Amino acid sequence: MPMLLEDVYAGAPTVKSGRHITTVNEFTDQSPALRPEVLAEATRRLVELGDFEAGKILVEEDKGAILGSAVSLAVGLPLAVARWYTYDLGGHGISVPVDSEYFAGTLYVNGVEPGDRVTIVDDTISTGGTLIALIEAVRAAGARVEEVLVAVEKPENGGRERVAERFGIAVRSVIRIAVDPGTGRVVVLG
C-alpha cells in the first residue's frame, strides 16, 4: 500500500516562520493542491490510530479542519471547530489563549458542551501550543478529552512532551518528521 503522506513530506521545502522552521507541502498548505488520495490516506491512517469512543471531534479551523472534516465523515461523529475569530453568541463559546508555531492570540471554541467526550484531531503537532489551547477549551467547557490524534509530529519542538506534562494526555501521531539542518528539507523519521 502506498505511503503517500511520507512521500508528501520527504524532501519537502521549509520556511522560517517566526521562531520555527515550517514545512510547506500539499497536505498542510495545499501547495501544490491537495490530492484526494493523500487526504484519504491520512484520514484512513488516523482512523486506524484512534479509538473514537468520544462523542465529538474538535479541530482548529486553519490547518486541522480539512483533515478533521474527513475524519468526522469517516467515523460518523459531530465536528466542533475552534476558530481564530469570535461570533457574538451571547457568551456560549469558550475563548482560550494560544501560542503555537504559527500563531499567538486567541482561539474561540463553539460546539463543545458540558459532559462531552472529545477526540481532538490536528494535522501537525510541533510546539504543542494549539493542542494545549484546545485541551484547555474542552476543560473550560466542562467536557473531557478522550484522545488526541495528529497526522504529523515534529518531535524536535517538544509538543508531545508539553501536552503530556501539562495534562497527562498522550498524543498519538501517524508519522514523525524533522528538518535536515544541512539542506533545510524535511526528513521522515522511522
Image: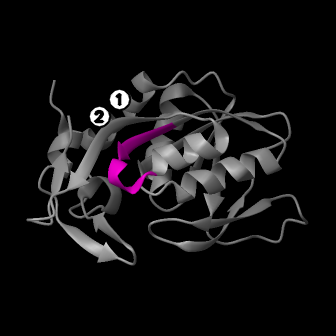
Local secondary structure at mark 1:
helix
**Residue 16 among those drawn in magenta:** no
Local secondary structure at mark 2:
helix
Could you tell me if residue 188 is visible in this image? yes
* Left or right for 148, reference 186: right
- Dots 2, 1 in contact, CB < 8 A: yes
Q: Position of residue 124 (x, y in %)?
A: 41, 50
Q: Position of residue 178 (x, y in %)?
A: 24, 52
Relative to the observer, which residue lies in front, 72 or 168? 168
What residue sits right under mark 2 in the picture? 41
Q: How crowded is mark 2: few (under 14 residues within 10 Å), some or many (20 or more)?
A: some
Relative to the observer, which residue lies in front, 146 or 44? 146
Q: What residue type is labelled 1?
A: Arg
What residue sits right under mark 1 in the picture? 45
Could you tell me if residue 122 is visible in this image? no
Q: Where is residue 24 in the image (x, y as percent from the top left)?
A: 25, 64
180 w.r.t. 1: above or below: below
Identify which residue is drawn at 35% across, 29% down: 45
Q: In which quarter of the image is the N terminus?
A: top left
Identify which residue is drawn at 57% across, 24% down: 52
Q: How crowded is mark 1: few (under 14 residues within 10 Å), some or many (20 or more)?
A: some
Q: Which of the 4 image quarters holds residue 57?
A: top right
6 w.r.t. 187: above or below: above
Q: Where is residue 131 in the image (x, y as percent from the top left)?
A: 57, 51
Give the magenta-colored segment's residue range: 149-158
Q: Which of the 4 image quarters holds residue 176?
A: top left
Relative to the observer, which residue lies in front, 89 or 182? 182
